[in-house]
Amino acid sequence: MTDKKARLTVDGQDTSVELPIYACTAGPDVIDVTSLTKNGFFTYDPGFMSTASCESKITFIDGGKGILLHRGYPIDQLAEHSDYLETCYLLLKGELPNAEQKQQFVQAVKDNSAVAPSIAKLIQSFPKEAHPMAVLCSAVAGLAAVYNDDTDIAKAEDRDTTAYRLIGQMPTLAAMTFKHLKGEDFVEPNKALDYAENYLNMTFGNSAASKVSPTLAKAMDRIFLLHADHEQNASTSTVRLSGSSGTNPFAAIAAGISTLWGPAHGGANEAVLNMLEEIGSVENIDTYVEKAKDKADPFRLMGFGHRVYKNFDPRAKVMKQAADEVLSELGLENDPLLAIAKKLEKIALEDEYFIQKKLYPNVDFYSGIIMKAIGIPTEMFTVIFATGRAVGWYAHWDEMVSQPYKIGRPRQRYTGYAKRDYPE
Ligand code: SDX
């Protein structure tokens, strides 16, 4: 509990309203404002710039120091020593798995990676011009039709099964979306392959188990890992709010996919590649940096800036290192887009505007360059982000529903008409 309290004064007058202050393991203390309403006030915080929406033990971000911890483990150490499914277990269970626990978890995910025929038909019903995120969002919402009656979210074992189904089927759905839009046959999941290997085989392979490059498989696994979770970002907050009504977990995850799609959030990775291609050469960079600084110009440097990080996004550092490694191993170290990205980063980081506004590269700045090198088309980038982030969304949903929770219901600052009568 707490012995620290904030006391509300209004225009210098004491209101006798005491607000408890709770300490955190790390990060700012929080002021509990739940009693404000009965004292005639709401808080007002558009965009939730200063609002802690929940208590969580999953991920911690220190935006000033560029720190990202998953259950206390720094993201760079996980990227170096762990893999995506081990990190999934960590996010869901709170501890790294021992060998037996990992083997059982990996097998449970593999055993739940096949997609129901009804969902395959749903994906095939979409036009080839559909954006992959629209297809993925519909397909995941469709899982709520497949898995509804047999799921009691109050039971831990049902929530575990749902986790295996979600983590197992996201890469299958992503690959099926890709194959459908390319007009190619689906490739079934192959249990003999590791997670990222299986995704690449379902995406680029044929019906047989094609040989997947270990370099590309490791890069793909690291991309999933780096996108796994990020505290209460817009899409995770959406999943929590949606889930707080007690809805089907796949429906809540589909709401998160919708939110991630936007260019201010997960859609930025697609926007970064389109921006780099629009810039076209290092000679044009200065023009675009000036456009990004021009208030009258809606152009923003995609892949730069962050609501929380006012220092380097630690994921961007790992992603940049991975981009160098993957492209040099593929003989693409002279990739023109990589050259533009590196030059753009250098110029921006030395520019007073970006320094003053603390705008640094975020997770989306380099991820697209790796995905393009792997052969993933730009419009699929956010689908990859969603595939990696599914476990983070689910971990937060599970953390919420596994203990007493209330439906989320924010209030507002009303500035519309006062009561008026209908004209006689
Ligand atoms: C993700 O929240 C998460 O954790 C998200 C995420 C995750 O893992 O879930 O990390 C993933 O979404 C990363 C962010 C990807 N988006 C982009 O790269 C799009 C480009 N970035 C911007 O749109 C912006 O930086 C945001 C949306 C990321 C953050 O927006 P904020 O916190 O609301 O900040 P802001 O828009 O109020 O910007 C503050 C100032 C503004 O100038 P002033 O009004 O103060 O004069 O900085 C400027 C902005 O104009 N600014 C930029 C800029 N980003 C902010 N100017 C030029 N280029 C940019 N990219």
Image: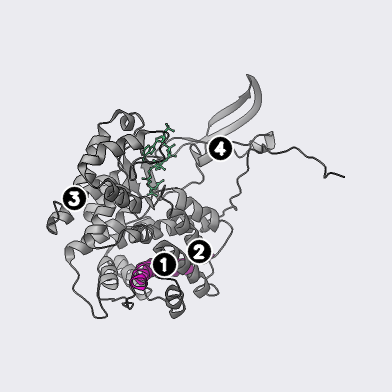
Give the residue pinned by disc 3: 336
For the point 24% across and 41% down, which residue is it? 284
Give the residue pinned by disc 2: 249
Give the residue pinned by disc 1: 166
Query: Pointers 4 and 1 in contact (CB under 8 A)?
Result: no
Mark sitting earlier along the chain (1/2): 1
**At label 4, which amino acid type do we have?**
Asp
User: Closer to the observer: label 3 or label 4?
Assistant: 3
Mark sitting earlier along the chain (2/3): 2
- Magenta range: 154-182
On screen, residue 326 versus residue 10, left or right, reads: left
Mark sitting earlier along the chain (4/2): 4
**At label 2, which amino acid type do we have?**
Pro
Asked whether 9 falls inside the magenta stretch, the response is no
Picture layout, residue 84 above or below residue 64: below
User: Closer to the observer: label 4 or label 2?
Assistant: 2
Instruction: Give the Cα distance between marks 1 and 2.
Output: 10 Å
For the point 22% across and 55% down, which residue is it? 81
Under circle 2, the secondary element is helix
Query: Pointers 1 and 2 in contact (CB under 8 A)?
Result: yes
Under circle 1, the secondary element is helix
Classed neighbour count for the residue bearing mark 4: other residues with Cα under 10 Å, few (<14), some (14–19), many (≥20): some
Residue 82 visible in this rendered orientation of the protein:
no
Which image quadrant is residue 126 in? bottom left
Tag of residue 32 = 4
Under circle 3, the secondary element is helix
Instruction: Give the Cα distance between marks 3 and 1.
Output: 37 Å
